[in-house]
Amino acid sequence: MPEHDPSQKEGPIEIFDAVPRPVTSFAATLVERRALAASLEVPLIGRERPATDLRRERAVEQIADIPGFEPWLAWVGHWTSRFGELSEAAAVSLRMSHSRHATCPRFHMDAVRLRLIATLLGPGTEWLRSEHVARANDGSIDQTPAPDTVQQLAPGSVGIFKGAAFDPVSRCGVVHRSPQERVDRVVMTMDIAA
């Protein structure tokens, strides 16, 4: 059985202090150099050979000369293996982006089974407990929850979020959004690819 069982947890599984300082520094340098023009996307990283698969990607080659690349590569390899094991995936996809605004400003549930969300720089993802999610008659999520009900991943945490496909009947995925602050934020997500 995996170390964490997402079916037994409301809200995301939060792994605290999971983004080490060299990775945060690497993310800050990416921002400083504007090296993530839009985003970096890798559609397929094998769980067994993540560093090898990543090195072959053209998008990754473009950041390989930035200080801190090797610690970032090792860290991504670790989380590829760990998320792959937890999700029982043979391969994952990766997306890393930089923004100064909320890229997902509305509360929503991702249309995936599981997603890893790690904020490498900036404030963590906001989310709601199921009892604080109000829905309209059409099933849409109310976008005005009481401010004191909004939860947030701690800086340096990695979150594993259940999506709508985790259990489509119960719709038990985690409702979340990007933080509303206008600050530099570098976010990495992983999804099941195979």
Image (spheres, grey):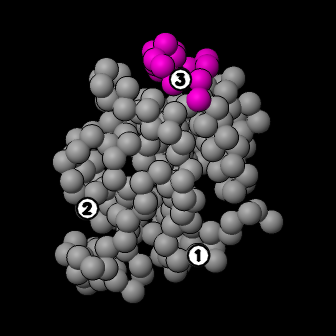
Label 1 neighbour load within 10 Å: few <14, some 14-19, many 20+: few
The picture quadrant where one finds residue 100 is top left
x then y, percent, for residue 134: 29, 83
State the residue lying farthest toward the front. 21
Q: Is residue 58 magenta?
A: yes
Q: Is residue 64 magenta?
A: yes
Marked residue nearer the N-terminal end (1 or 3): 1
Q: Is residue 112 above or below residue 57?
A: below
Q: Nearer the viewer, residue 136 or 25?
A: 25
Label 2 neighbour load within 10 Å: few <14, some 14-19, many 20+: some
User: Closer to the camera: disc 1 or disc 3?
Assistant: 3
Q: CA distance from mark 2 to mark 3?
A: 32 Å
User: Closer to the camera: disc 2 or disc 3?
Assistant: 3
For the point 49% across and 13% down, the residue is 65
Q: Which residues are magenta?
A: 55-71
> Which SS class for mark 2?
loop
- Type of amino acid at the residue the image marks with label 2: Arg
x then y, percent, for residue 81: 70, 43
The disc label shown at residue 9, or none: 1
Q: Is residue 62 visible?
A: yes
- Type of amino acid at the residue the image marks with label 1: Lys
- Type of amino acid at the residue the image marks with label 3: Phe
x then y, percent, for residue 17: 54, 53
The disc label shown at residue 26, or none: none
The residue under label 2 is 106
> Which SS class for mark 3?
helix
Q: Is residue 152 above or below residue 180?
A: below
Q: CA distance from mark 2 to mark 1?
A: 23 Å
The residue under label 3 is 69
**Tag 2 near tag 1, CB within 8 Å:** no
